[in-house]
Amino acid sequence: MTATAPETAAMRRALELALLGPRAGVNPQVGCVLLAPDGRVLAEGWHHGAGTPHAEVDALSHLAESADARGATAVVTLEPCNHHGRTGPCSQALIDAGVSRVLYAVPDPGEASAGGGERMRAAGLDVESGLLRDEAEEAIRPWLTAMRLRRPFVTVKWASSLDGRAAAADGSSRWITGPAARDDVHRRRSEHDAIVVGTGTVLADDPALTARSARGLLEHQPVPVVIGTRPVPPGAAVRRHPHPLRVHATHDLGAVLASLFDDGVRSVFVEGGPTLASAFLRAGLADEIVAYVAPTLLGGPVVALGDLGVPTIDRQRRLRLTSVDLLGDDLRLVARPRASDTDPHLVDTTTTTTTKEL
């Protein structure tokens, strides 16, 4: 595609604006910059969350009284939507405002919301797609993956000792990692729509499954989800969560994810211990792995992961590290399965799997 230097700079700014919006939620993070024909920035906007104006409409609302959008260029990180939801279609809003040119980074993969580009072309606008697409794909990767695969983006997290143990021989595990790593876990919980554990973890650890800081509960709380056939005790801490507890009395992880997606969940944080983490990995349902490694040795039988269905070294599940950071004394590693290197809309990894008691 062809883009001017001001348009490319505007897309980089739009990506910055997009990240100001909430990461969790049914809607994506989107940013928009409106440019005058001479390349000057007329207005900026971003999506502030479900029920609020989309980025394009937000930008239009910030035009100075002396300016208008006639003949302007709209630079948007995601294809302007083409459907009526809580708000009207952004593609029509840009048409009505008199915008003459639209550049967007990523096509909208939504079944109902796609098609904004074609609507604007049909109305006579100059529309181009693909400007800084790789950067935009990375910025909203969880939402794009969810929409393309029709299941939530799955982050699998665990903490272990340097020798790969999740707990001491007696099962005790609080705390392997230090305060900085635990704070990071709570921040990541708050960036996901749901937090998932198995009934085994509920019975053994009685977790609250909330996202917290030293000052108390964080603003966004993930929906608590428990998978497994054993009952959750009436007095369990998770039953006092700000959101109602969801229990899936099944071992079919694909069915659980499909149900969560249908209910608007676009990302889940799996913290369910070795059995559940291994089940998601074995089924090919993990999009991202976050592992915290503490400089301590525990030995014993309680390993961080169980059977992954790797019968020989030739079948090992290689990962691609995306970041390695020191948090206090602990190491945080973020990795992705190698399959994620392909375009996720071409690879549907949703499968049915069964596990032992979670």
Image (cartoon, rainbow, N blue to C red):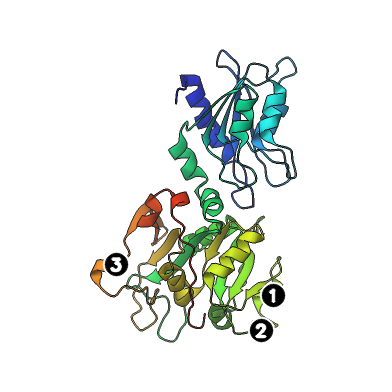
> Of residues 159 and 338, which is closer to you in this image?
338
Report crowding for label 2: few under 14, some 14 to 19, many 20 or more residues within 10 A (C-alpha): few
Q: Which mark is residue 324?
A: none
Q: Which mark is residue 316?
A: 3
Earlier along the polypeptide chain: callout 2 or callout 3? 2
Report crowding for label 1: few under 14, some 14 to 19, many 20 or more residues within 10 A (C-alpha): some
- Tell me: 68 left or right of 354: right
> Of residues 122 and 65, which is closer to you in this image?
122
Earlier along the polypeptide chain: callout 2 or callout 1? 2
Q: Identify the residue at the far front of this view.
A: 122
Q: Residue at x 59, y 32 (%)?
A: 117
Residue 308 figure quarter? bottom left
Earlier along the polypeptide chain: callout 1 or callout 3? 1
Residue 64 figure quarter? top right
- Tell me: 136 left or right of 226: left
CA distance for labels 2 and 3: 38 Å
Q: Is residue 62 visible?
A: no
Give the x, y percent position of residue 281: 42, 68
Q: Which residue is mark 2?
A: 233
Say which of marks 1 and 3 sits in front. 3
Q: Identify the residue at the far bottom of this view.
A: 170
Q: Amino acid at mark 2?
A: Pro
Q: Which residue is mark 1?
A: 239
Report crowding for label 3: few under 14, some 14 to 19, many 20 or more residues within 10 A (C-alpha): few
Q: Secondary structure at mark 1?
A: helix
Q: Amino acid at mark 1?
A: Arg
For the residues bearing labels 2 and 1, Cβ distance under 8 angstroms: no
Give the x, y percent position of residue 155: 49, 61
